[in-house]
Image: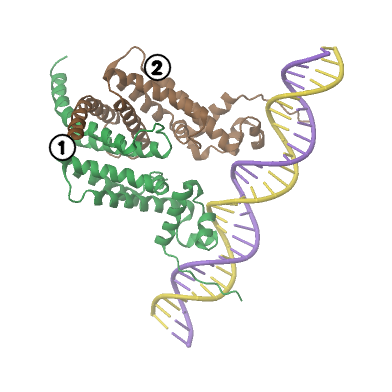
Chain colours: A green, B brown, C purple, D yellow
Amino acid sequence: MSPRPKIGLDLTTILESAGEIANKQGMQEVTLANLAKKLGIRPPSLYNHFDGLPGLRKKLAIYGIEKIYEAMANAAIGVSGTEAVLAISQAYVNFARMNPGVYEAALMAPDPEDEEFQLAGARVVDLSIRVLQAYHLEGDYALHAVRGLRSILHGFSALEQKGGFKLSLDLDESLMIIMKAFLAGIGEQQNFNEGALLTTETGV
Amino acid sequence: MSPRPKIGLDLTTILESAGEIANKQGMQEVTLANLAKKLGIRPPSLYNHFDGLPGLRKKLAIYGIEKIYEAMANAAIGVSGTEAVLAISQAYVNFARMNPGVYEAALMAPDPEDEEFQLAGARVVDLSIRVLQAYHLEGDYALHAVRGLRSILHGFSALEQKGGFKLSLDLDESLMIIMKAFLAGIGEQQNFNEGALLTTETGV
DNA sequence: TATTTTAACTAATGATATTAGTTAAATCAA
DNA sequence: TTGATTTAACTAATATCATTAGTTAAAATA
């Protein structure tokens, strides 16, 4: 009696469902109970697909980073220089804006040391480095600059999501102004710092 | 038998205990069960001091923002100009580094619209505005710049905490380079943008 | 067709926040 | 000082979770 339908869920479907819950209700509502209800199965059945709630969070984080990478890479097609940096920045912020829950999941990695997670993150970093190469930054300065770019993009996205920007001041305009200032600064400061470094090393 | 000792907890003691748990074990371990155990009382007794777990999180968030403000304001004493901006930036990041759990709580505000929480946040914003006034930024540009400063500081702190900076590259050096680039850029870009704006308004 | 694997299930456990109602200590007012 | 009130602890009970163990039938495979 009451035949047991075998839905045959695959991981992608599950992650998309989890992503929907995250985006609409927030990551704190991504529970096995809610996810199972949405999928029409019982919570313990989910253990056949991933290793408990931590496992789901990890997979959703990787899924999210891959989506961010895709959005950035797509925005960087056919553009170069400052235009390219601004394009990937806008794409990053747009993604976070349109997918707040998935973005939160992507940066809420339970274990930052996880290899698969690191690999996904490395692709975003590599893309950033490549796009910043237009500025001909030398040595470690390029790596500091990438840290700066990531800090701005994550900080801006996180604060925007948490309602940290209260004023009725256009958000995209803020982002562009911030990015242009930073980019103008790294070009100029690199040379300045090299000069300063020399004098410091030489005397006083 | 077994007299019931009345400990007479006050909110500050409770928040300090919660802050310790948050810093040592992470915000996810700040549960009523753990907090009650640490304080030597039963979980329901905590409801006499705050309104459940959401209430505790809110109070801890405000407590955290006030601590951040204190650290920044203290760092700004007796310095001015770029030196002051760099000082409050370093103080902000140091606070997040030394108090990861409390920092997380401060930026995990369950309700960003809460009046008390907004008031505490406004003090940090005001301080930032005042320190940035050394750059004589005009009109909205000053507000965009404050958004930039906050984005950098939060983004940098959050990524550092989440293990987002993998390379063996000095973190404080990164922060200073990023901030100097941004500050050099806002001074320069402000004029540039005004010029650009005029030409855009005039023609084409 | 027989076997194995897979993906669902039920049942049970333990941790959690929360509510309701209770009690005794501490405080305060007369 | 004493009586009333407030406060801060408590016990008991409930509901929601995640999780584990063991089960079963559908699907895939040999």
Residue A16 percent across, percent down from the top left:
41, 57
Residue B111 percent across, percent down from the top left:
50, 36
Residue A84 percent across, percent down from the top left:
20, 44
Q: Element under label 1?
A: helix
Front residue of A120 and B20: A120
Looking at the rendered structure, whether the residues under marks 2 and 1 are on a common chain is answered as no
Q: Element under label 2?
A: helix
Quarter of the rendering containing residue A202: top left
Amino acid type at circle 1 is: Tyr
Reading the image, the residue beneath label 2 is B74
Q: Which mark is residue B105?
A: none
- What's the distance in space between the residues labelled 2 and 1, CA to CA? 37 Å
Q: Residue at x 43, y 38 (%)?
A: A162
Amino acid type at circle 2 is: Asn
Reading the image, the residue beneath label 1 is A135
Q: Residue furthest front?
A: B202
Q: Is residue B168 in view?
A: no
